[in-house]
Image (cartoon, rainbow, N blue to C red):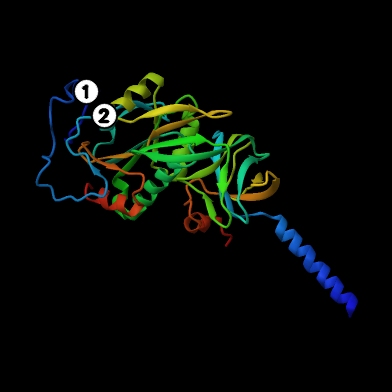
Amino acid sequence: MLKTSILTAAAYALCAAATAQAQVEIDEPWVRATVAQQTATGAFMRLTSRSDSALVQAESPAARHVEIHEMAMENDVMKMRQIDRISLPAGKVVELKPGSYHIMLIELSKQIKEGDHIPLTLTFQGADGKRETMRVDAPARPLAGDSKAGRGARHGHAH
Amino acid sequence: MTRSMSRRNFLSALFAAGLSLHGCSRSGRPERFHGKDLTGADFGRDFLLTGTDGKPYSLSDFGGNVVMLFFGFTQCPDVCPTALLRAAQAKELLGKDGERLQVLFITIDPERDTPGVLDAYTHAFDPSFRGLYGDLEQTARTAEHFRVFYQKVPTGSSYTMDHSAIAYVYDRRGELRLGLHYSQTAQECADDIRQLL
């Protein structure tokens, strides 16, 4: 009896430790599929950090270069800039989406087709300077699909 | 015969730009647009560019249709696919009338947008959409005439393009009528375009 309790407690402790370790929750990652010869595309997702931190680096075997970009509209002109980091205030949902931030995949090794899974390695840095690396597989949504889950996912879902 | 504008006329029109006001008067029109009303504008009258089939095209080649014109580049991860998707959705919302909407995508990055990638890219959104390109000088001249701003911006490993994100709409007579803002929905675009069909 006692042994079981200890084991259960240990299991809970392990779970708690594992959960505590993942400082950042990554939801609905996706990349935009490309056409042949297109050498760049964007990756998008929702990030929620438990404590103040920042996305400071992104890498992918699918692209030679990966950059963090911010897009802004000024007087009907679209401006895109590479940025060093995306701040993730504690508990706040930060969206990487068209019209805002995105991860830019440059010099793709091959065409990204709808349904492909693109591995991304993201590095986050906490306020204490500690770095944590997380890996996600981002499914490719159709180039001509909606950035919102609805329309794009319509093609993505299996019948 | 429908009104057609030859290339020579296009050049004349370019020289005459600013001297003449033409088309509908600014007053007394019943249309209420979500986009910017550009009726009577003295810019963006025509272009002479190359299609992905290697043939020359000007605006008059699409006479009889409502034309939506957008400047962008295929390496654009954000605004360009969003605008082209919106155009495809607007066309769908117009139903049968959508067949009389011609969407044109002019690249402002001809160095990277080869005819092959431009063709595949535009067709991914709708088989009827067309990509157009020119050399660097033609591109610069065309953008200037359409009051489209663009500039190369270096990033760590490559470059990106800042560019105007407005989509121009021409009525069936080839007159510039509207500028659709990036923030407009597909439904708002379809409502605007329907008034010109």
Depth check, front residue: B55 or B40: B40
Depth check, front residue: B109 or B66: B109
Q: Residues within 10 Å of mark 1 (few under 14, many from 20)?
A: some
Residue positioned most to the front: A128
Amino acid identity at mark 1: Leu
Q: Residue B88 location, x and y as percent? A: 39, 48
Q: Earlier in the sequence, mark 2 or mark 1?
A: 1
Which image quarter: residue B84?
A: top left
Amino acid identity at mark 2: Asp
Depth check, front residue: B173 or B188: B188
Q: Which mark is residue B194?
A: none
Horizontally, residue B124 falls left or right of residue B66, namely right
Question: Residue beneath label 1, please?
Answer: B14
Q: Is residue B54 visible?
A: yes
Q: Residue B15 location, x and y as percent? A: 19, 20
On-image quarter of the N terminus of chain B: top left
Q: Residue B81 location, x and y as percent? A: 45, 43
Q: Are marks 2 and 1 in contact (CB under 8 Å)?
A: yes
